[in-house]
Amino acid sequence: MILVDTGVVFGAADADDPRHSDCAGLLDSLIDTPLGVTVPVVVESAWLIESRLGAAAQASFLRSLTAGEIERLDLTETDWARVVELIERYTDLGLGVVDASVVAVAERLGVTQIATLDRRHFTAVRPSHIPSFELLP
């Protein structure tokens, strides 16, 4: 499984985004690979898409979740505890709940690849299960 962060979701949805081709191309190339998004990524992505692209675009994104194109991943109690730990550990970095949720779920599921445009956070955070994440695209 590859976890997908908000930047890639939004970039793929917005044809005017400077990274649209990279993001849409990446997701298209991974059509046979299981993709997952944490619930905080769903909420952030849905809000960004609706506020910038409208309700129809938001519905299209949410439809991809209900159709099983991208798996929605709920956080466990242990994941939430890890989110808090990561936010406290990376205070100077400004790691928020969305990115911390991606790290926590990746650790729990043993995921090594993250589809993200956020190099700043995901190169600085050291996951507990591997030395560093492989970042796509």
Image (tube, rainbow, N blue to C red):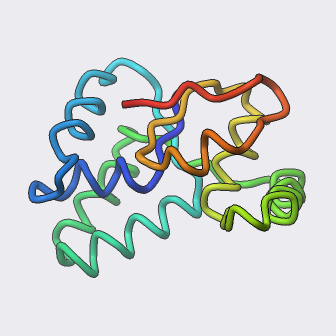
Q: Position of residue 102 (x, y in %)?
A: 64, 48
Point out the image quarter for the C terminus.
Answer: top left
Q: Nearer the viewer, residue 114 or 55?
A: 114
In the displayed structure, would residue 90 be above or below residue 114?
below
Residue at x 68%, y 54% (from the top left corner) = 101
Residue at x 81%, y 52% (from the top left corner) = 79
Residue at x 38%, y 75% (from the top left corner) = 47
Residue ranking furthest to the top: 32
Q: Nearer the viewer, residue 92 or 67?
A: 92
In the displayed structure, would residue 118 be above or below residue 85?
above
Is 22 situated left or right of 30 in this image? left
In the displayed structure, would residue 32 be above or below residue 95?
above
Residue ranking furthest to the bottom: 51
Is 131 situated left or right of 102 in this image? right
Is 36 situated left or right of 125 in this image? left
Is 51 situated left or right of 4 in this image? left
Residue at x 70%, y 55% (from the top left corner) = 100
Question: Which of the 4 image quadrants contains residue 75?
Answer: bottom right
In the displayed structure, would residue 40 be above or below residue 127?
below
Point out the image quarter for the N terminus.
Answer: top right
Q: Position of residue 66 (x, y in %)?
A: 39, 51
Q: Position of residue 118 (x, y in %)?
A: 48, 49
Q: Position of residue 60 (x, y in %)?
A: 22, 59
